[in-house]
Amino acid sequence: MDTRLLNTFTTLARTGSFTAAAAELHLAQSTVTVHIRSLEREFGTRLFDRLPTGALLTESGRRLLERAEDVLDAVARLKAYGDDDGAVRGRVVVGAPESLCSSRLPGVIAALRTSRPEVDVSLYAAGTAGCVEGLRSGRLDLALLLEEEADFPDVTTEPIGREPLALVCAPGHPLAASSRRASWEQLADEDFFLLEQGCSYSDNLERRLLAVPGARPRLTRFGSVDAARSCVCAGLGLALLPLTTVDEHLRQGRLARVNGPRFADVPVRLARHRRRWTAPAARAFAEALKAGSA
């Protein structure tokens, strides 16, 4: 069987769109259609329902998907063995929260370019849900999760470090000058700029604030650390952010730490698909990441 057909099949299953699959594979949309029809003839069953909203896997398609991924994974291993000349090369797609993409990972990538110049790293900013979905679909090779616990049946994780958090406000905010520790009751009357749903420490903070009897916090969610931090710098409210994303602002006096409840450091977990092979380039990135976190 032509593995190009299986690659088209898995791409269409992931994107749910003939147009998107064609764009990703650099094929004409008609070619994607021909590939899928060829597979359906070979297996004697319909693999997708063609709907106005896109292509939806049938039950037969769902059964085939896992086996198709196994075949493509085995082919990737064979190619790696055949190309093995001692050099580590290839592209690695890594998913991570936006805060890690902007703070910790650039240094890791810079170090990797020196030690493994033929490894190309692409970053994809996403929360836990997006990273796990990316690993499952094969769109991501590795991911970083900021989670206390990460229990997913098809994803394995290992802790590689911890990320300190900082509750911050503008220097002119009343809480910036207070020597007394702010209580949850006081904080529940404040405006907060939190990161998007699925950010574990933002979700935990929201739950704590809303658990205060009569709580009236105004909670605004952002998908960007920069946006949340800018609102706090402008004196519009408070934010709980990774220390690495605000330490320069704290040193420059553009932000101040709030004397409030203690927030535990968040574990940084390296995640990969449990069943999928980890290519040498991805292993090289993981090694550089662990060395940088040591």
Image: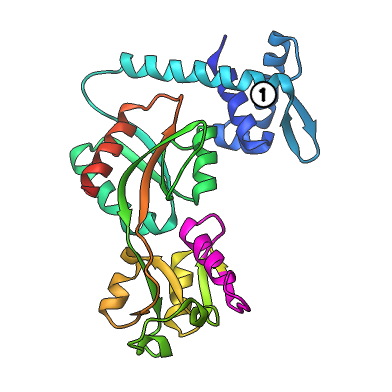
Q: Which SS class for mark 1?
A: helix
Compare residues 84 and 202 and report the one nearer the observer: 202
Residue 11 on image: x %, y %: 59, 30
Name the residue at 74% across, 37% down.
54
Q: Which residues are magenta?
A: 195-220
Q: Is residue 203 magenta?
A: yes
For disc 1, the marked residue is 62
112 within the magenta span = no
The picture places residue 254, in percent across and down from the top left corner, at 34, 82
Vertically, is 81 above or below 112?
above
The residue under the point 49% across, 39% down is 151
Q: How many marks?
A: 1
Q: Position of residue 113 (x, y in %)?
A: 24, 43
The quadrant of the picture occupied by the N terminus is top right
Quarter residue 52 falls in: top right
Instruction: Tell me if 129 is positioned left or right of 165 in this view.
Output: right
Q: State left or right for residue 5 relative to residue 258.
A: right
Q: Is residue 191 visible?
A: yes
| Residue at screen point 46% across, 85% down | 235
* Picture colour scheme: rainbow
